[in-house]
Image (cartoon, rainbow, N blue to C red):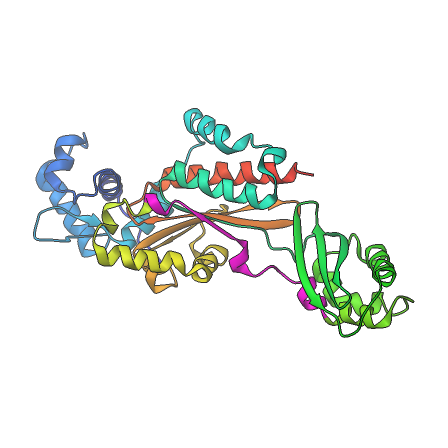
């Protein structure tokens, strides 16, 4: 949405209202601002500024009290044009590093363990609902494939992708095959497909295997199943969530109906994953990778009372997402600072895992 450039006085008052509301969860009045902030303005002048902000939809009066709270429009102006984000402070950095930044792959066990650990640490640090999406795999490099015969007509295909991700699929065979035929197919597949991206394999596997002399029935099964074997992992299976216990403690979700709505949204993992993976790019600040979606800017109805802050992390040429879900009354500066550092830490951890 296009926002009018506010005057310096209006920006100061709007910023104070948002900062105070974030800290106290209570509506902010002109008398409070005059008493606690040295703006050089009288109570009456501050009241006039607040009236102007209210007329233009940046703040609203929730009850008959004199206090005002920010609207979605007010938060958007603050995020885009007022707040400044500095680097993470040493205390937060040490806390994150102690819990996650120095995690060793030997300790973590698997990539899934690393991603779940990241979600837990982010939830604990932000005191909000945290979400981590594992990277999309279409542009990732296929390393090798193995096939385990479960019976003469059933096999499990195991794909290794960039030393990080393992994908397993159980397949039924139309005819019985021997272990030797399986080994021959595995050798050809690894020889001809290793080093390609999954997308390249999906689009060219038939041509790449057209002249191989391995068992035709097994080869044809692999070619027919390429869309399933070398496709993206379903988005719900890429999702790691933590921090539900923190977000339900927020004052905004104390009423039973609000708690029910929140839990219902959290249980709808597909909707949560889509909100993280595909935020409105128009909400991203120029030159910044962090995306902040506020209230009704979120496409899902159940997220209309939330702010969602997301940023990508990178593992080679793969891209994942990490995010925080919280009330609109969240500490935006802290959220962005922590997300940026966590994304970098997660990228570094996964990039050095072999």
Relative depth, front residue between 264 and 4? 264
Residue 259 visible in the snapshot: yes
> 244 left or right of 250?
right
Is 231 magenta? The answer is yes
Quarter of the picture containing the N terminus is bottom left
The answer to which quarter of the image holds residue 146 is: bottom right
| Residue at the (73%, 63%) spot, across then down | 155
Magenta-colored span: 225-246
Percent of width and height locating residue 9: 23, 40
Percent of width and height locating residue 212: 90, 66
Is 224 magenta? The answer is no
Percent of width and height locating residue 288: 49, 45
The answer to which quarter of the image holds residue 191 is: bottom right
| Residue at the (24%, 50%) spot, across then down | 252
Relative depth, front residue between 191 and 42? 191
Percent of width and height locating residue 136: 60, 55
> 344 left or right of 57?
right
Relative depth, front residue between 196 and 57? 196
């Amino acid at each position: 949405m296009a926002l009018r450039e506010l005057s310096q006085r209006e920006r100061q008052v709007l910023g104070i209202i948002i900062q105070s509301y974030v800290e106290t969860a209570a509506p902010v009045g002109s008398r409070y601002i005059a008493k606690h902030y040295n703006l050089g303005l009288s109570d009456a002048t501050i009241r006039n500024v607040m009236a102007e902000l209210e007329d233009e939809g940046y703040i609203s009066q929730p009850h008959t009290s004199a206090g005002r709270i920010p609207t979605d429009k007010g938060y958007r102006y603050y995020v885009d044009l007022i707040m400044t984000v500095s680097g993470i402070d040493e205390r937060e950095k040490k806390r994150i590093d102690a819990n996650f930044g120095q995690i060793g792959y030997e300790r973590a066990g698997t990539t899934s363990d690393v991603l779940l650990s990241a979600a837990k640490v982010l939830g604990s640090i932000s005191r909000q609902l945290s979400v981590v999406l594992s990277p999309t795999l279409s542009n990732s490099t296929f390393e090798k494939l193995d096939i385990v015969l479960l019976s003469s007509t059933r096999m499990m295909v195991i794909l290794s992708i960039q030393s990080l991700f393992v994908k397993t699929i159980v397949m039924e065979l139309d005819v019985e095959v021997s272990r030797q035929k399986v080994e021959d197919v595995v050798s050809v597949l690894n020889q001809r497909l290793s080093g390609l991206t999954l997308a390249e394999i999906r689009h060219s596997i038939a041509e790449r295997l057209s002249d191989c002399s391995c068992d035709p029935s097994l080869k044809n099964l692999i070619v027919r199943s390429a869309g399933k074997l070398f496709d993206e992992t379903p988005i719900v299976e890429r999702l790691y969530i933590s921090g539900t216990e923190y977000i339900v403690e927020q004052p905004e979700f104390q009423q039973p109906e609000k708690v029910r709505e929140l839990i219902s949204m959290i249980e709808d993992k597909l909707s949560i994953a889509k909100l993280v993976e595909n935020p409105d790019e128009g909400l991203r600040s120029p030159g910044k990778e962090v995306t902040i979606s506020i209230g009704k800017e979120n496409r899902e109805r159940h997220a209309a009372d939330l702010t969602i802050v997301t940023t990508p992390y990178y593992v080679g040429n793969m891209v994942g997402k990490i995010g925080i879900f919280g009330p609109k009354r969240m500490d935006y500066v802290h959220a962005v600072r922590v997300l940026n550092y966590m994304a970098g830490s997660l990228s570094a951890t996964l990039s050095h895992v072999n």
